Image (spheres, helix red, strand yellow):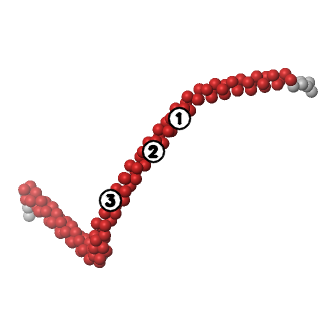
Amino acid sequence: MDATIRVGDLATFLLGGALLVLIVYGILLLKNLNDTLKVIRKIVEDNRSNIDEVLDKAPSIAANVESISSDLSHDVRAVQGTIDQIVGTTEAAAGALSEHTDILSTLMGFVQILNIFRQFIGGFRRKKRWF
């Protein structure tokens, strides 16, 4: 008993098997999708009152947010002038401090020189002991 299988018949058989596997996979996928949609539908039905409440309150929440943001924008504009004045005053103070820094560093140099000279002179005034 010799049987021969042609390549075309083998390819047709393999493609048919692959198509059958693909159909089974698609059916399982659709079944899982249907189960998921049933669960989602049940959750929505169970929480219908909460969802309706949120949807009823959403416009007032949006209006409150808009009111708060407009009030805040107005307040920020009102404070902006004060902030600009503070920044200007701070810049002026920093400029004045940088001008006086040179004078202060020179004065500190003189104080250090006087301190070194005082220590040097003070060393001669001490009595030196041999023991």
Identify the disc placed on residue 66. 3
Amino acid type of the residue that numbered disc 3 sits on in the rendered structure: Glu
Q: Residues within 10 Å of mark 2 (few under 14, many from 20)?
A: few
Apparent side of residue 24 relative to residue 99 in the rendered image (left or right): left
Q: Residues within 10 Å of mark 1 (few under 14, many from 20)?
A: few
Q: Residues within 10 Å of mark 3 (few under 14, many from 20)?
A: few
Q: Is residue 107 above or below residue 37?
A: above
How far apart are labels 1 and 3 at the CA level?
Answer: 40 Å
Apparent side of residue 101 relative to residue 47 in the rendered image (left or right): right
Which one is earlier in the sequence, the residue at label 2 or at label 3? 3
Q: Position of residue 65 (x, y in %)?
A: 34, 61
Of circles 2 and 3, the one toward us is 2
Identify the disc placed on residue 94. 1
Amino acid type of the residue that numbered disc 1 sits on in the rendered structure: Ala
Which one is earlier in the sequence, the residue at label 1 or at label 2? 2
**Which residue matches tag 2?**
83
Amino acid type of the residue that numbered disc 2 sits on in the rendered structure: Ile
Q: Is residue 29 above or below residue 72?
A: below
Q: Position of residue 85 (x, y in %)?
A: 46, 42
Q: Is residue 110 above or below residue 92?
A: above
Look at 9% across and 59% down and name the residue there. 12
- Secondary structure beneath disc 2? helix
Q: Position of residue 60 (x, y in %)?
A: 31, 67
Apparent side of residue 33 relative to residue 97 in the rendered image (left or right): left
Residues 91 and 50: in front is 91
Identify the disc placed on residue 50. none
